Amino acid sequence: MANMYSHENMYPELYKKRPWIRHYDHLVPPEINFPQWPAFELLFNTANNHPDKIAMWFYGTETTYWDLAMQVIRFANALVGIGVKKGDRVGLLLPNSPQFNLAFWGTLTAGAIVVNMNPMYPVDELEFIAKNTGLQTVIAFEDCIPNLKELTKRVEIPNVIITKLSDFIKNTAVSTPESLGLEPGWYHFSQILDACGNTSKPRTGVTRNDPAVIQFTGGTTGTPKGATLSHANIVAGIYECAIYGNNITATIPVERLKAFCVLPYYHIYGQVCQMGWCIYSAATQIILPRFEINEVLDTLEKFDDITYFGAVPTMLTAIFNHPRAEKMNLGKKFTFVGSGGGPCPIELINKLLDMNVYYSEGWGMSETTSVGIANPDFGLKKPLSVGVPVPNMDIRIVDPETGEDVPQGTPGELLVKGPYVMMGYWNNPEETAKQLTEDGWLHTGDVVYQDEDGYIFIVDRTKDMIIAGGFNIYMQEVDRVIMGHPKVADVICCGIPDEYRGETLKAFIQLKPGETATEEEIIAFCREKMAAYKVPKMVEFRSELPRTAVGKALRRILRDEEIAKRQQKK
C-alpha cells in the first residue's frame, strides 16, 4: 500500500519540482515560511523570550541576552549620534568577541550595512574594500591600529572606533584612547557605549529588502567582489540553519544550548551558522577570538556539554588528532559537529566516527548566505556527497558552454535560486550580470552531478580557486601580486593536495632572463602584499610555464604533475 503521508502524496506539486524533499528529516518542513522582519529583530525576540539566559561566554565573562540587547541598542544609538545613517557602510575589523556582537547587531539596528573585513587583510586590500563600498565608519580592535593609521592616510573614513578585546573581560582594566595611541578624532568603543544611555531602538525605517551585509569574495576573476546580502537573506540563512538541524536540538532544554564559536564571524559561515544560530536558538556563544589549539582544548575542558560546533576540516583535524582528545570524550561532549568550508577527508570522517562524534557536511557560498545544500541529520547520507538542496532552494545543473540542463548523473555547473541568494555584488553591475541571471539564478562556478536520489556530488570548480584551511584563495589574484615582482616574467599558481589544509598553494615562476631569485624572496614579497593565508607555501622556478595558444594558464597540468610526483615518492 502506498504511503498516503509521503511527501509525494502530501505535496505533489512541490515534489515534482524538488523530489529530494523526501529525504528531509521529520521536523524539517518541505518549505519554510520565513519572518518578514529585519535581521536585528531576531536578537530582540530572543532577549524578550529568554532575558536571563547567558548569551556570551568570553574568557569566563558572561553576558545575558537582555544585557546584550540593551548594549546593542545603546551602541546603535551611539552610532546614530556620531552621524551614522541608514544605508551607510560600516566596516568591522574584529575577531570573534563580545564587541563583534555589539558592532554587528548595533550596526544593523542603526540601519547601516555591515561590511565584513578580515583583520588579517593588509592595507592594500583594506583600501580596495574601503573605496569600493565608500566606508563611512570602521570598528576595529587594537591589533589593527597600525594598518588603520596607514589606511586613513589613503582613504577618508569619517568615523574610526577602536576597542581592546580585554575591555570586555571582567576584572580587567579598561583601555583608554591614550593607552591605545588613538589618532585625534578617533572614537574609543567603550567610551561611546558608556556615554549613551538610550535604550529605545532607533526608528530607521529598515525593511527586510534593505541591504544588511556586504561579504567580500574573490569570485571567478580573483578580483574581490562584495556579495550584498539583504536582511531577508540573513534571516533566511539563520532560520534555515536552525530549522534544518532542529531534529538534533529539539529535545534539548534552552538552558543547556551552547555553541563553541571559534569559526570567524567575519566569514559568512561563522556569522550565520554560529553567531546567528545562537541568537535564533537562545544558545550561549562560547567565544574564542582565534584558533590556537592549546587554548581551544583548554576551553573545551571547561564545558561538559556543547550543543553545536561549526568548523572547517583543518580545525577538526587539529582537535581530534591531538593527544589530549582521546581523554576528553568528545563524542559525549559535542551534541553535533558541522563541517564546511571544504571537503572533509575520508580519514578525518573515519576518525570522527571512531570517536562517536555526530557530524554532518554541507555546502554554501558567501553569495548564498552560507547555506544551500546539506546532508539530513537522521536520514540517508552518501559518502563524499554534500547532501540535498535545503528547503526553498531550487537548483539546475547545466552545460557551462550551452547553458542547457544536463541529464541526471552528468556533471555540469550548479545554478541555484532561492531566498538565500544575494541581491548582487556591491557597486559591480558587470560581475553581477555575469553571475546572477535576471530571473534570479546564481552561477556558482561549481561542477557537480546529482544522482537518482537528488544528492549532490561536487566534481570540480570552474573557478580558479582553492580552499585551504577553510579560506578561499583565488589563484589569479595571487598570480597578479607575484607578477608585480620586478624579477618575475610569468607565474601560474595552483592548488595541490595537502593532508592538513585540504589544499595548499604552490607558485610556479618563470624569471626574467638573467635574473635569479629564491623561494624565500618570493614568499617574503607576497607577505607584504597579501593576507598570510593567501601566500604560497611553496615556490618552484621553471624555464617556461604551460599555457594555451591564447595564453590561458594550464593549471591542471601543473597540479597533475605534482600529484604524480607525490605518488612516486610513496
Image (cartoon, rainbow, N blue to C red):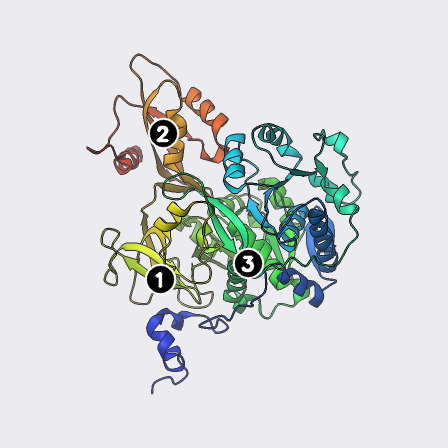
Sequence-first disc among 3 and 2: 3
- Report the residue at 70% width, 53% height from top: 72
In the rendering, at what x and y percent does residue 474 appear? Answer: 40, 39
- Report the residue at 59% width, 30% height from top: 147
Image position of 141 with respect to 308: above or below: above
Circle 3 residues within 10 Å: few <14, some 14–19, many ≥20: many
Sequence-first disc among 2 and 1: 1
Q: Which residue appears farthest toward the bottom when viewing the image?
A: 1
Three-letter code for the amino acid on which mark 2 is drawn:
Ala
Image position of 376 with respect to 288: above or below: below
- Report the residue at 54% width, 51% height from top: 213
Of the residues tagged 3 and 2, which is closer to the observer?
3
Q: Nearer the viewer, residue 201 or 60?
A: 201
Of the residues tagged 2 and 1, which is closer to the observer?
1
Q: What whole-number distance in Å separates the C-alpha atoms at marks 3 and 1?
A: 23 Å
- Which quarter of the image is occupied by the C terminus? top left
- Label 1 belongs to which residue? 395
- Label 2 belongs to which residue? 507
Q: Residue 565 carries which label?
A: none
Q: Nearer the viewer, residue 479 or 244?
A: 479
- Label 3 belongs to which residue? 231
